[in-house]
Image: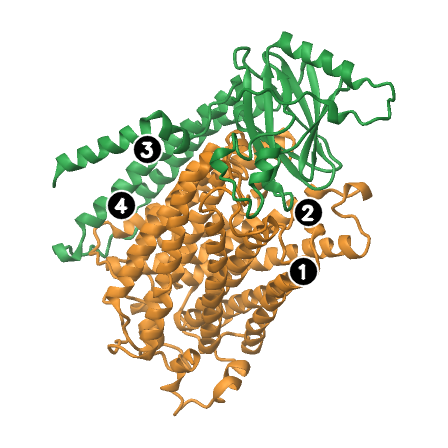
Chain colours: A green, B orange
Amino acid sequence: MNMKKLATAIAVVTAALASPAAFAAWTLNMTPGISAISRRIYDLHMVMYWWCVAIAIVVFGFMIYTMVRFRKSQGAVPDTKLVHSTTVEIIWTVIPVLILIIMAVPATRTLIETDDASHSQLTIRITGYQWKWGYQYVDSGVEVLSTLDRASNAARQLGSNIDPATVPNYLLNVDHPLVVPAGVKVRLLISAQDVIHSWWVPALAIKKDAIPGFVNEAWFNIDADKTGLYRGQCAELCGRDHGFMPIVIDVRSKADFEAWLKTQQAMQRPADPAAPAVATAAPAPAHTG
Amino acid sequence: MAYSATAESHEHHDHKPSGLWRWLSTTNHKDIGTLYLIFAGVMFFVGGSMAMVIRLELFKPGMQFLDPAFFNSMTTVHALAMIFGAVMPAWVGLANWMIPLQVGAPDMALPRMNNFSFWLLPFAFTLLLIGFFVPGGAPAGGWTLYPPLVLQGGDSFPLAIFAIHLMGASSIMGAINVIVTIMNMRAPGMTLLRMPLFVWTWLITAYLLIAVMPVLAGAVTMLLTDHFFGTSFFSASGGGDPVMFQHVFWFFGHPEVYILILPAFGIVSEVIPTFSRKPLFGYEAMVYATASIAFLSFIVWAHHMFTVGMPLAGELFFMLSTMLIAIPTGVKVFNWSATMWKGSLTFEPPMLFCLAFLFLFSIGGFSGLMLAIAPADFQYQDTYFVVAHFHYVLVPGSIFTIIAAVYYWLPKWTGHMYDMTLAKWHFWLSTIFVNVLFFPQHFLGLAGMPRRIPDYATQFADWNMVSSIGGFGFGLSQLLFPYIVIKCIRGGEKAAARVWEGAHGLEWEVPSPAPYHTWETAPSLAVIHSGGEHWTED
């Protein structure tokens, strides 16, 4: 074996994967997110992952050892009487049961926590449409309609000849993001107008179906220091342009958010209350997250 | 024509019509088995070419070739063709060929219904595929057919519903036939706990089919009346509930995925003992584990729906019940491993495919366990992580074991050995490319790429390109399969009755190729006992 060559190859690959440019593209894992809950879910995912790795090492190790050790070509003689062992069978039933119980405890705890939307300070209604998202701040009445940004939309047309790499945040950018405060427990009431959509922001670890005629509830409380832009997509097949209705949340400090909401409220309280207010929402900030 | 080759050598002593009429009118379980397998093979390449189109569009970001609506048709029809057209008919074909041989029966119990259940399938798939040529295009709402989206379909919508009705009727008849054959036609002395595992897993599968295919038929009929007759089962504006469809669908859908995999467990339980030259470890535990998995399949369905907004108690129940599946599945994997322990292993193509199954199906099991964890599933649901998961259990799970079964019994069917070297190439290329194809999809899903999208953000570009390269490699390597099979039908080294040194079971007691009619006289007790699946001391 040429171990030196192998070591060099591993080093080269590791270096390539670790360099910042490559890291952005060759992503391997889930985001830990920007809230306590999203980190709990990430931890749960990692715990499950390492359990699977550990079990795989034991089980696959046993299989590989067996395959190498008991080859006919190496003169292995079959022990045809070895067909049953109650002890062994009990052991390999009981151990998985114990592992499952160990896995179930944190999973159940986290699940119960995600379900508790009480004591929220702000409520936002989310409505899925083919193929855009509508947001309404329930207390203030401010509404935002959020659709795929023009640059992405132009580039994604068949035969556009626009290189997606030249479009900033290709397919993950919108005209009007959902502006939310950090450090505030926000409740989401999610529904849809036409078909089922699913509102998913990985950084929040929230994916909740938007179902016409029904209202689903979700909540988040973003860390006070995690301001910025975070992106997601519709996660339930909703027709032709399912792939083209992204979600962008613009997380601002509590004070900035309140100032933004006030401005919007003033702009959207028109002289004629019947006039559609949605188009007047502030454009997305220029900076990217 | 390929179809006539298998039977020609026996025409001199078996009375049957010749040419096309033989195949249209046949009531012979071997002929019908062959028809099912050919049909499954054709649909595997139809569904596979759709997968190639999908991977081509996803090769790099930007829309290169397809309209998004056509892309959605590709994913939808790919799934329907592979599930209902390739995997299920392949299992029914193998059941037809092998169950009578394995239990010592002269034929299936209901031969005319057997013919009918096969000949429904070409009509069903004609209806489905005609959808590509009608206004509105082929079904594009996903194979899960969720309303209200599916109700927006064009003229192909009722065609697809009727196609599903026909497929369901065909499956139910096939299942009834399997159950009646196993229950009534076993040779005297072939007790239930002497049956080969393939027969056992198929018996349990057949019960699942009978239990859930009518549920699917009911669900799609309600879609039909919602669309055309003004009912509102699934429309909130009329007092219905779109989520109710998902509950009904997955009450069918989860047992359905075990319908696709339980016969695979049977094949692995046949092949590993043969090439380990050692009886299956824990035969009875294997039977009970299969039955437990079948039972659990009825109480876990809503784990496909963790994001629909179920009450907490519901999510908890479905999370915990789903985790339980790991126990009987683990028992099976441990039993297969223990079968190899202290065996005498050789690595012919059927064994190679089953060993790949052991490792890769387990990987699918691990991701399945992760997906069971409801809070984590909020992140996984409807992403490429799920796509990777179910392709790991269905491709190296079901498809690899179907290939293993064909390589295991092909000499019995044709009387010729096939080209072992080419079959090993087929194995290595398939195993390498299937991992290049599906493993990166775990990363894509975790990084945030939703499934069923025709175009994606640029940070997903690299792994998608790797996955597409794996896809093209896997697709091309499958062309070896029909080549090897056809070459084997046409000729080759003469196969012995007991093709494999370590093979035990009644199918190896008849000559190769198996005569047109077998076990017209039931095998003797001595033959049954010596060839029994688990070598007993008596």
Residue type at mark 2 is Leu
Query: Is label 4 in a helix, a strand or a loop?
Result: helix
Label 3–label 1 contact, CB within 8 A:
no
Q: Residue at x 38, y 68 (%)?
A: B482
Query: Is label 3 in a helix, a strand or a loop?
Result: helix
Label 2 – label 3 distance at C-alpha: 42 Å
- According to the image, label 4 marks what residue? A63
Q: Residue at x 39, y 54 (%)?
A: B472
Q: Are marks 3 and 1 on the same chain?
A: no
Q: Nearer the viewer, mark 4 or mark 2?
A: 2
Residue type at mark 3 is Ala
- Which residue sits furthest bottom? B12
Label 2 – label 1 distance at C-alpha: 14 Å
Number of residues whose C-alpha sits closer than 10 Å to that of mark 4, classed few (under 14), some (14–19) or many (20 or more): many
- According to the image, label 3 marks what residue? A54
The quadrant holding residue A99 is top left
Q: Position of residue A10 (x, y in %)?
A: 23, 33
Give the mark nearer the N terminus: 3 vs 4: 3
Query: Is label 2 in a helix, a strand or a loop?
Result: helix
The tag on residue B156 is 1
Q: Position of residue B463 (x, y in %)?
A: 40, 40
Residue A140 visible in the current orientation? no
- According to the image, label 2 marks what residue? B149
Q: Nearer the viewer, residue B469 or B13?
A: B469
Q: Are marks 3 and 4 on the same chain?
A: yes
Label 4–label 1 contact, CB within 8 A:
no
For mark 2, name the chain. B
Label 2–label 1 contact, CB within 8 A:
no
Q: Nearer the viewer, residue B422 or B402?
A: B422
Give the mark nearer the N terminus: 2 vs 1: 2
